[in-house]
Amino acid sequence: MNAWSNWCSARGISQPIELFPYEQLDKLLSKFYGEVKKVNGADYEPESLRVMQAAIDRYLRDKDYGESIISSRQFHQSMKTLNAKAARLRQQGMGKRPNKAEALNQSEEELLWQNGSLGNHSPVALTNANFKCLSEQMGLRGRQDHYDAYVEDFILRKHDDGSESIVFNENPTKTRSGGLRVAKRTTKQVMWSTDGGPRDPVKLFRLWLSKRPQPMRNQGPLYLTIIQRPKNDDVWYTEVRMGQNTIGKIMPRMTSSLESSTAEKLTNHSTRKTVVQKLKSAGQPRYKIKEITGHASEASLNDYDAISEEERRELSHIISGYSASASRTTTSVPSIISSSTAPRPTEHDTSIVPVQVRQ
């Protein structure tokens, strides 16, 4: 609604949008769609215009406006204007999302472990590894979710079979929040131990906490500022909270060593796309993937339907009549998620060890 509010303010329009009659609002929206631009004067992407329209429609629906600006014939002219503008922008090459985040492929992920960008040997590598694990397995999204997380939000569980798991007590985020109707996942976010090796996600998380200053090992913001040259091996982090901007640069800095054509498009959001591709490649249904990623609905996964490079390779080989056995498989799922071998315990064989519950 910010774009609408700013556009109205610039034209001296102060009347609340929900008070306009249908015909007058249709004309006003038509003018808005045709004129609205970014602060720097550039056009919005066609998808951004659609999002604006949906936001206005949602606002009006909450105000019991009576008609939808998207589906009602009362708003035929404004819809026509919006569609025409979107078509014109696409003809100009917009809407192709050239800079959208890419997912990490298997070889890129392995290279990050091999070159030391991920690991347990340094404060930077350990933070990177935990950022990746929490993004993929707990569904933490972007810098804000990571910044808002506290040690007290995580509970360590030890199981009778010797395995361990970390449970995330999720707090509502901005896209799933709302008074008495908070949309939560139907299952708890849980990260399971694997083989106890250097890539075991639970082992990495426990090591991460153990490298914090003693008073903050069981409490406080999850992300602390890194000590670049630790004086001893016991403490790798200060008591100062890591800033949002620093968290926002974790993925770009981590992947800066990669030389692939997609390296510049690897952002914090890439971890989200990576886990979707891993689970899709493993044949997991959408309703399960949604529980991991935290998407509000299965339809939200539509944006992740683009096939991976390996899948495209396999399809190309099929078209060429190339032997399927010689083509790379697309069903293997590398790294943390695929390596988990710990069986899911029954309700009678778990002992819960809380780190500390935040009040």
Image (spheres, rainbow, N blue to C red):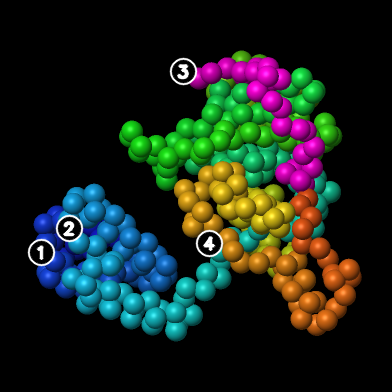
Name the secondary structure under disc 4.
helix
Q: Which mark is residue 359?
A: 3
Q: Amino acid at mark 4?
A: Asn
Q: Earlier in the sequence, mark 4 or mark 3?
A: 4
Q: Amino acid at mark 3?
A: Gln
Q: Amino acid at mark 2?
A: Gly
Residue at mark 4: 302
Residue stretch in magenta: 335-359
Q: Is residue 237 above or below residue 257?
A: above
Coordinates of residue 172 in the picture (x, y in percent): 44, 36
Between the C-alphas of marks 3 and 2, the distance is 43 Å
Residue found 32% across the figure and 69% down from its top? 37
Badge 2 density bin: few <14, some 14–19, many ≥20, Cα 10 Å? few
Q: Which mark is residue 21?
A: 1
Residue at mark 2: 66
User: Is residue 69 located in the magenta-colored stretch of the structure?
Assistant: no
Q: Nearer the viewer, mark 3 or mark 2?
A: 2
Q: Earlier in the sequence, mark 2 or mark 4?
A: 2
Q: Earlier in the sequence, mark 4 or mark 1?
A: 1
Q: Earlier in the sequence, mark 1 or mark 3?
A: 1
Secondary structure mostly taken by the magenta-highlighted segment of the chain:
loop
Residue found 74% across the figure and 74% down from its top? 315
Name the secondary structure under disc 2.
loop
Name the secondary structure under disc 1.
loop
The reply to whether the C-beta atoms of the residues labelled 3 and 2 are less than 8 Å apart is: no
Between the C-alphas of marks 4 and 3, the distance is 38 Å
